[in-house]
Image (spheres, rainbow, N blue to C red):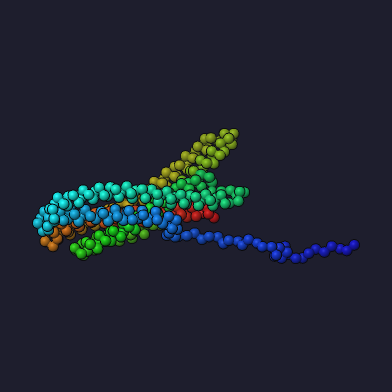
């Protein structure tokens, strides 16, 4: 009987003739600007139309300052207008009607853009979860998964809307600054100081804003996850007589969530309040300087009114810029949490 011989060929060598599916390298998380760029590319025409409508609205916000300045110069006698002040009043009325129509059109485009952006993220997350093998559980508890679909997708949608509008607002603010610089360069230079202060302040507080948003998002996910687990195991909890402990657990998580949410909300609103305060202080200084120029005769009444009107526009942009920087920092947490669901 011939003895049997065992093959010493390694299993991998015996299978070398088979075609194996290449292992895909894990995807690296993208930066927040990269995510925003891809979201914009999904619906570029809607985002572009949204930006155009808000561009027109912001540009139209400069028109009342020009009309009011011309109106005061006409009353003072330093300028003449065909048709007199009645023409200027008619322009303001027509402008108000036009701006109302633009608000409706811009609001419609904003709704379209917001729903498309959040829908894109939620559909992609759901598609990825459905593509997972059936035996694999969800990467996170059900309640926490729902929280990422709901809250984090909304945060990403919100920052996309802010980005689309703040860019246009910045361009119009630069246009206003350039026009004011032709009237008085020194006062215009003072106007830019609050913008610099707000930008540096937000950069300094960026780590704290991110940390607070991470804590609030995590606490919200924990509450949602605990509620989902309790509802899924209701009969087990009743059989064990653990109803009071389950309710106490929910109460503890809710108390933690309340604390983290309050801290996160205060941090975000504080950045907006600081930006508004800095802008208001800058406005007061500019008004004092402009009043001194008006008393000295280097500024006319119309130019002074133009400064005050456009300065309010720039002040609003400064406050919005500070709020946007806070939202942008907080959105990075939302993108990171949704990216974690993709493995």
Left or right of 194 in this view: 162: right
Percent across and percent down for residue 109 are 37, 50
**Quadrant of the snapshot with the N terminus:** bottom right
Quarter location, residue 170: bottom left
Quarter location, residue 175: bottom left
Identify the residue at image location x=39%, y=54%: 46
Left or right of 232 in this view: 109: left
Identify the residue at image location x=20%, y=55%: 65
Identify the residue at image location x=53%, y=60%: 27
Between 290 and 249, the residue placed more toward the observer is 290
**Quadrant of the snapshot with the C terminus:** bottom right
Q: Is residue 233 above or below residue 268?
A: above
Query: What is the count of numbered marks?
Result: 0
Identify the residue at image location x=26%, y=54%: 60
Percent across and percent down for residue 191 are 24, 60
Kindly tell me whether residue 59 is visible in this rendering. Answer: yes
Left or right of 3 in this view: 298: left
Between 201 and 97, the residue placed more toward the observer is 97
Percent across and percent down for residue 13 are 71, 65
Q: Is residue 303 above or below residue 138?
A: below
């Amino acid at each position: 009987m011939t003895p049997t011989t065992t093959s010493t060929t390694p299993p991998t060598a015996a299978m070398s003739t088979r075609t194996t599916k290449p292992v895909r390298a894990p995807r690296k998380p993208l930066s927040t600007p990269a995510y925003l760029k891809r979201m914009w590319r999904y619906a570029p025409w809607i985002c572009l139309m949204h930006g155009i409508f808000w561009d027109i609205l912001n540009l139209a916000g400069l028109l009342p300052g020009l009309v009011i300045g011309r109106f005061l110069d006409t009353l003072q006698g330093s300028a003449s207008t065909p048709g007199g002040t009645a023409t200027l009043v008619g322009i303001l009325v027509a402008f108000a009607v036009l701006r109302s129509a633009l608000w409706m059109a811009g609001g419609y485009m904003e709704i379209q853009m917001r729903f498309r952006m959040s829908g894109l993220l939620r559909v992609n997350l759901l598609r990825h979860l459905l593509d997972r093998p059936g035996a694999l559980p969800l990467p996170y508890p059900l309640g926490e998964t729902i929280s990422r679909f709901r809250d984090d997708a909304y945060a990403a949608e919100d920052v996309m809307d802010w980005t689309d509008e703040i860019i246009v607002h910045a361009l119009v603010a630069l246009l206003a600054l350039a026009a004011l610089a032709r009237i008085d360069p020194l006062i215009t230079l003072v106007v830019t100081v609050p913008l610099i202060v707000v930008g540096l302040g937000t950069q300094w507080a960026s780590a704290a804003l991110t940390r607070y948003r991470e804590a609030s998002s995590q606490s919200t996910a924990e509450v949602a996850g605990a509620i989902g687990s309790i509802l899924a195991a209701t009969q087990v909890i009743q059989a064990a007589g653990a109803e009071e402990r389950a309710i106490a657990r929910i109460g503890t998580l809710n108390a933690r969530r309340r604390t983290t949410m309050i801290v996160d909300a205060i941090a975000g609103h504080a950045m907006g309040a600081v930006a508004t305060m800095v802008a208001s202080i800058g406005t007061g200084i500019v008004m004092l300087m402009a009043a001194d120029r008006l008393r000295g005769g280097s500024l006319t009444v119309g130019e002074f009114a133009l400064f005050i009107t456009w300065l309010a526009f720039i002040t609003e942009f400064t406050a919005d810029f500070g709020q946007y920087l806070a939202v942008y920092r907080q959105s990075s947490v939302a993108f990171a949490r949704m990216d974690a669901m993709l493995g």
